[in-house]
Amino acid sequence: MADSSTIEPLSDGTQQLPSSKQNGTNNYLIKVSDALPSHHEIQKFLTASNCGAISTFTGITRDNFAGKKVTSLSYEGYTPMAVKELTNLCCDAQKKYPNVARMVAVHILGDCPVGEASVVVGSSSPHRREAIACTEYLIDELKGRVPIWKKEIYEGDEQSVWKENVEWKDGRRRRVMVKEESS
Amino acid sequence: VHSKEAGSSRRQQFRIPMATITIKILFFASAREAAGGITSTNLELDADGADTQVLRTKLASLYPKLAPLVQDEENLTLALNEEYVDMGEVKQLSSGDTVALIPPISGG
């Protein structure tokens, strides 16, 4: 948590405000279940009177992979740990982007047909730079940390495949390297 | 009247049984499929030296189709009580622990 006496202004001149609720999880909407909150619910949650910017990212099932026709994705999760990791994620994002007021990190479980949303992450901040950067951080980190798996289901006889995020392997190697440096 | 020696040999006949611990295993995604579709099970391990390395070996012997995956630390991570065990780390296990088998993730 930033010490209010030593906060530097951001490069665009924005003054950083000490946040009294930096670790307050009532500023984070986190959900892992068989239905996403509605778009309206997400926007409403992210809206804060001191924020001029809301930035969200939505992940949608795509209809193709490596020349194969995808009909649907199927998501499985270690739900209590996924919620825990999403919470930790938001806390880490808060440290990186202290002016962000609210965050959303929600993920579906079960079937997600082509064109449907599987994940939404988002944030709100006084000015746009932090919200945009924070939202990007949330999805990148989610892909490297949160214990959820997707199976890609194809048209016809093609065997369905468990996908693997490149962010997962990269993250694991980074964690081992950091440990080795500190030992 | 029992002599000291007779007493000792009698004591040796009653061996203290080795303590065991019971832990819960959760199977996910490809690990679940490789283990025949099982989602969770309770497992008994010798308390002495019970750790994540020993657990991998035990799971490999109980679920032969899972063996290549569970013994491959690169491709099968463990989570102990909802915290990842880092590569190269070996964690001690206690009764009541939950260990989840975590193949490479793909959320988002």
Image (spheres, coloured by chain):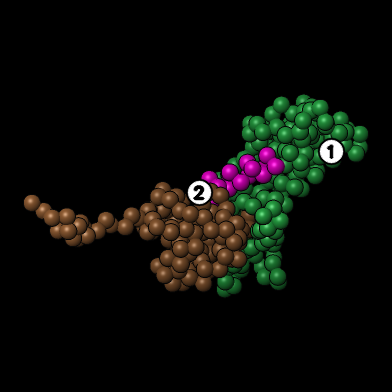
| Closer-to-camera residue (B85/A123) | B85
Residue matched to label 2: B81
Horizontal arrangement in the rendering, residue A72 relative to residue B56 (left or right): right
* The quadrant where residue A35 appears: top right
Residue matched to label 1: A128
* Amino acid carrying mark 2 in the image: Asn
Horizontal arrangement in the rendering, residue B25 relative to residue A95 (left or right): left
Q: Which residue lies furthest to the left in this view?
A: B1
* Amino acid carrying mark 1 in the image: Arg
| Closer-to-camera residue (B78/B51) | B51
Q: In this view, does A102 lie above or below A83?
A: above
What's the distance in space between the residues labelled 2 and 1, CA to CA?
38 Å
Q: Residue at x 58, y 48 (%)?
A: A82
Q: Magenta region: which residues?
A: A73-92
Q: Is residue A19 above or below residue A144?
A: above
Q: What is the secondary structure assignment of the residue under circle 2?
A: loop
Dot in front, 2 or 1: 2
Q: Mark 1 lies on which chain?
A: A
